[in-house]
Amino acid sequence: MTVPRQSVHVDSPTERRNPRTADIDTLPTVEVLQLINAEDRLVPDAVRAALPQLAHAVDLAVAALGGGGRVHYVGAGTSGRLATLDAAELRPTFDVPDGWFAVHHAGGDRALRSAVEDAEDDEDAGADAMASVRPGDFVLGLTASGRTPFVLGALTAAHDRGASTALVSNNPDTTPPPGVDVLVTVDTGPEAIAGSTRMKAGTAQKLVLTSFSTAVMVRMGRTYQNLMVSVRATNAKLRGRTLRILREATGLSAQECSTALTESHGDLKVALVHLLSGVDIRRAAEALRSSEGHVRAALGLLNAHAV
């Protein structure tokens, strides 16, 4: 039976007391909120400083997906819950194929609803969670302290299995652990309430995850311009959005766009390439297959053939 390994105490900035909020418990409600808001406003700049490293992680993820691999998120507590949320929202937004993204959360599904605090200390459980990782995959670990054993155990095991890896940490003192190819450090400093990493650290990780996955989707051709042309129209609201997107992208009437969507069996990308290029539905679909679903690339192919 594996005995969970205990976390080593780390004097992470997220655990230190914040001198700016030392008297927060003496203030009226609006000033409490103003202090919290002032701390929250520091987060975007901290994320901006880490963008070069995050870009490297995006490129590794794009290479993994382009090569037939998967992207894995690994986290514990708030980090794991945010990762689960991010992955869940990719399918309806970008029609992400099954298997592109997988989430490994310390403590499993039960930890999504209730805190299972000791789960994050089990390094071996993190390693075991990587059983489905294959060579060529990409694994992104998230931990405010940069030291969570479950996450580090997973990254080491993933690296040993031939995956590329990255670690998102809110601790500027974190050094790249063995098995980590990219370290993304987002220095958010001490929390408004000492150690409550669901606050600034969690906000930073939400921004990192949203930026990361959206950039990956853009690079994978799941958008055209800044439009969600891969959206899955699974309800009335999304069907209406699909028609609006097609009208925005083409400048054509609702009737013309509706007809194109019907002829393309609801495939927004096919309808878009058909309308923008003037080719029939079959050729539009073939061009998209040849360009791996990239609308601009498909249009380029059709234009090249027309010359």
Image (cartoon, grey):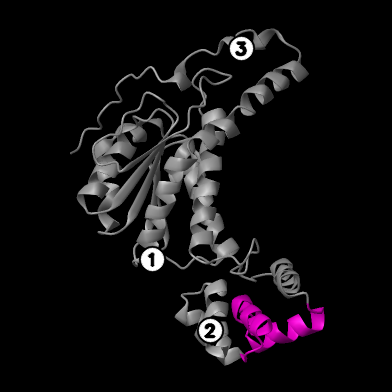
Q: Which residue is mark 1?
A: 66
Q: Position of residue 114 (x, y in %)?
A: 49, 37
Residue 225 vertical placement versus 211 (above, below) = below
**Mark in the foreground, 2 or 1:** 2
| Residue positioned 69% across, 67% down in the render | 238
CA gap, disc 2 and disc 1: 24 Å
Can residue 166 be spotted in the picture? Answer: yes
Q: Position of residue 240 (x, y in %)?
A: 75, 70
Q: Which residue is mark 2?
A: 304
Marks 2/1 in contact by CB < 8 Å: the verdict is no
Query: Which kind of residue does numbered mark 3 sit on?
Result: Arg
Residue 296 vertical placement versus 80 (above, below) = below
CA gap, disc 1 and disc 3: 46 Å
Marks 3/2 in contact by CB < 8 Å: the verdict is no
- Secondary structure under the numbered disc 1 in the rendered image: helix
Residue 63 covered by magenta stretch: no
**Which region is colored magenta?**
252-280
Q: Position of residue 90 (x, y in %)?
A: 54, 58
Residue 112 vertical placement versus 249 (above, below) = above
CA gap, disc 3 and disc 2: 61 Å
Which of marks 1 and 2 precedes in the sequence?
1
Determine crowd level at label 1: few under 14, some 14-19, many 20+ residues with C-alpha closer than 10 A. some
Marker disc for residue 20: 3
Determine crowd level at label 2: few under 14, some 14-19, many 20+ residues with C-alpha closer than 10 A. few
**Mark in the foreground, 3 or 2:** 2
Which of marks 3 and 1 precedes in the sequence?
3
